Structures are given as structure tokens and as C-alpha cells.
Image: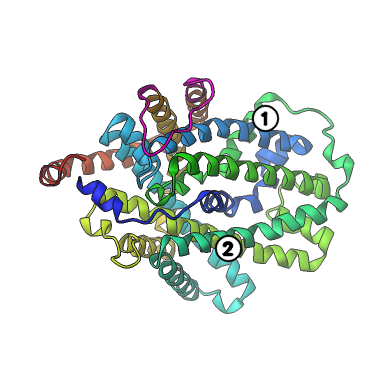
Amino acid sequence: MSQRASIESSLVRAVGVWGLAASIVNLIIGGGIFRIPSDPAVAGLLGAAAPIAYVICAVAMGFVVLCMAEAGSRVSMTGGPYMYVETAFGPYAGFLVGVLIWMIGATAVPAISMIFADNFARLVPGFSSPAAKVGLLVVTYAIVVWINVRGVRQGTRLIGAATVVKLAPLVLLIVIGVFGVHAEYLKPAVMPAKRDFARAAMVLVFVFAGFESALVPSGEVTDSARTVPRALLLGMTMVTLLFVALQLVVQGILGPHLAGTPTPLADAAAVVMGGWGARLFAVAVVLSTFGFMTGMALAMPRALFAFARDGFAPRVLASVHPRYHTPHVAIVVQAVLTVALAATGAFERLVVLANLAALLAYLGCCLAAFELHRRDVRGAGEPFVLPGGNAIPVVAAFLVIALLSSITVPEWRVAGLVLAVASLIFVSTRRARAERIATSGSV
């Protein structure tokens, strides 16, 4: 047995369809949905026609998700998209995609963690100082780490509970808000131009992002050939319906007052529920960001684990707890890094990379799905096969390339620097990886 397979076999496959679907929903619904309905590119450009942009975006992202579904049903090792691309195109391409996926989390999680701390401080004024916020994050992550180290089942249960808690106020707003909707606010006076829909859809792509990180712990998913496709389709369907319903309700309640407000959901809740509704959504932001943090605390350490397993990072990060069968060292290190970046604000210089990193990772996975299908790569079980053969990966790749055309030159420069550093790591570790393969068998 190769060293990679040996390390993977020590993990516990305990994440089922509902657990993975909850993780997908949890990571997509972070903090963006509390702000995006009033975004200038959404409410400002489209007005009452904004829900159409959600559908357009959901269809575009649906093609990418279908590619992930087939790739995930064929490759079931820890690393998710990283392993899909490696299996299709080799270690170098896979490592670059793995770095991009990890970079998304490395920038997003500290940012969301600070949103969590800032909003918690508004509810509990005693936590308003910078030191108190850092202390709050230390305690919060200590609890999250303790739960995740004790087992992937426990981590998945925490994510499930956090997902239910964060969904509750959103669903409540939809149910109660329907009775406060003004029909005239939902009728577009003039249908916006096609370019306005395209611009809004590009903004919304990143509201739907996050599902790729949920796939990183693939080595702990049960029957991945069936679980990954079902969870992806279930999770994305739930999120799409929720987002469209929220946009309709908030637009129907606030109408011309929607565009530009920084707290659209809280404003709509205040109208139909009164003061307690606004307070509820202040709490909801804290709960939603906490849920995102718990989801990433499960997903992102598995990327470090995969890098170490394959010789790109210190071997200690590939350690598996002898009792709980979790990558405990990677979990702790990722949490410490997150708190440090959040406390120092160092992540802000990297945030510009997140959008481009997501698109490049999506493109890699679309191409990988094409190649895995062409070669009929199979893991355990019968793979999920896309209707139309390889037509969907081709369409998905062209859609992602179209979105990449909106990336600015400075963003490409930052991405190029990151990929250059990743390439240096790949080259500098080549000898050590070759020696490891020689002593433990082929990877």
C-alpha cells in the first residue's frame, strides 16, 4: 500500500448526503446574503427584475456544479478539487488548484471571522475593543477545534446544527414577509438591458461560491460516487430557492428603498416584524458567520492535510489522531493561522485574489471533469455520468472563461505571484517527494 493510501485509510468515512449538503449550504450562506440584495449591481441596476439574475447565475453555476459532481463521483480522496485535477492532469496542475482552493479559505475565513467578532461586539458592548475581539476569536476557535478534533461526525453535527440555526431567521423572514409584500414593487417598469443582467450575474457568482471548499474532506465521505453528486445538487437547489425567495420578499417589502441600504434583510424584517425583527437579524449575522467558520474549520484543514500527505508541506500536518482518526495537527494549525490573520489584518492584502482564485479553480475542475469522463476514471462505485457526455464541461469552461474576462490586470498580477510561489514549492519539494515514493511505493 502506498503512503498516500495508508494515510487516507486511517480516516473515517462518516459524512453522508445530508451532512455534506448541510456543509455546502452552510459555506455558501456566509455573510453575503445579508448584504447582496441591495447591491448596486443587483437592486441598483435591475430593480424588480433582480430575481432573474439569480436564476441566470444559478444556471451558470449549475454547469460548474455538475462538473464537480461527476469529478467527485470518480475521485474520492481528501483534497476534493485538488485531487480531481491531479488525477486528470498530474501533480503540478493539481497542486496549483489545491493552492487556489486553500487561498480562498485563507482569505475568506479571517474576513468572516472579523465580521463575526464585530457583530458580536454590537450585541455585547464589552467585546468592542480589539483585544476583546481577538480573545473572542481565540475562545470560539478553541471550542470549534476541540469539537472537530474529536471526530468528523462531531464536526459534521456542529455544521448541521449551525446550518439549521442560520436558516431559521431567513425562512422566518420569507414566511412572514410574504404578507408585507407590495405587488407593485415586483413589477419592472422597464426590462433592464442584457448587459445589466450579465453584470449582476457575475456579482452573484461569488454569493453562490463556497461549495468547492465543502468537497475538500472527500476522504471522509461515505460512498462518494453517490454522496457527492446528490449532496451538490441538493445543496445548490436549496440555496437557489432560498436566495430567489429572499430577493423577492425583500424587494416586495422595501421597493425603491432597497437599493443602497447596507442592511436590506434587517430593514425588511423591521418593517414586517418591528424592532425585534431588526434585532433578530443582528443575531442572525452572528449565527451565520459562526456557521461559516465551523464549516471552514472542517474543510480547510483537510487541504493542509492533503498537501502534507503528498509531500508539499511538513509531514506532521498529515498526522491522524490515533483515537479520533482526524487530522488534528492540521486542524489546530489552520485555526491558529486564521486567528493570527484576523487579528493582524494581514489577510486584507490577499482578498483581491479570492474571486480570481475561485474562477481558476472552477475552470480546472471543469477541464478535469472532461478528462476524467474521457478516460472513464473510476473510484469506488459506479460514477455519476453527466447527460450529454462531455458537452456540459465544455459549456461550463466557456462560461468560466467569460467570467474571467472581467478580472483586472492587478488581480492577474497577484494571482501570478501566488502561482509562482506555489510553483517554487512544487519544484523545491520534488526530490523529497520522489524519495518518499521510492521508499513507500507508487502514489
Given the image, on which type of amino acid does mark 1 rest? Asp
Residue 311 seen in render: no
| Quadrant position of the C terminus in the picture | top left
Given the image, on which type of amino acid does mark 2 rest? Ala
Which residue appears at 74% of the width and 64% of the height?
Answer: 278
Residue 382 magenta: yes
Q: Magenta segment range?
A: 374-394
Q: Residues within 10 Å of mark 2 (few under 14, many from 20)?
A: few
Task: Write down the residue under mark 1.
Answer: 196
Image coordinates for residue 314, horizontal then vertical, percent: 22, 55
Task: Write down the residue under mark 2.
Answer: 161
Image coordinates for residue 221, horizontal then vertical, percent: 43, 49
Q: Is residue 443 above or below residue 123?
A: above
Q: Is residue 14 left or right of residue 204?
A: left
Question: What is the C-alpha distance between the residues marked 1 and 2?
Answer: 38 Å
Image coordinates for residue 393, horizontal then vertical, percent: 48, 25
Judging from the image, the colouring scheme is rainbow
Q: Nearer the viewer, residue 52 or 124?
A: 52
Q: Is residue 395 above or below residue 306?
A: above
Residue 283 - label? none
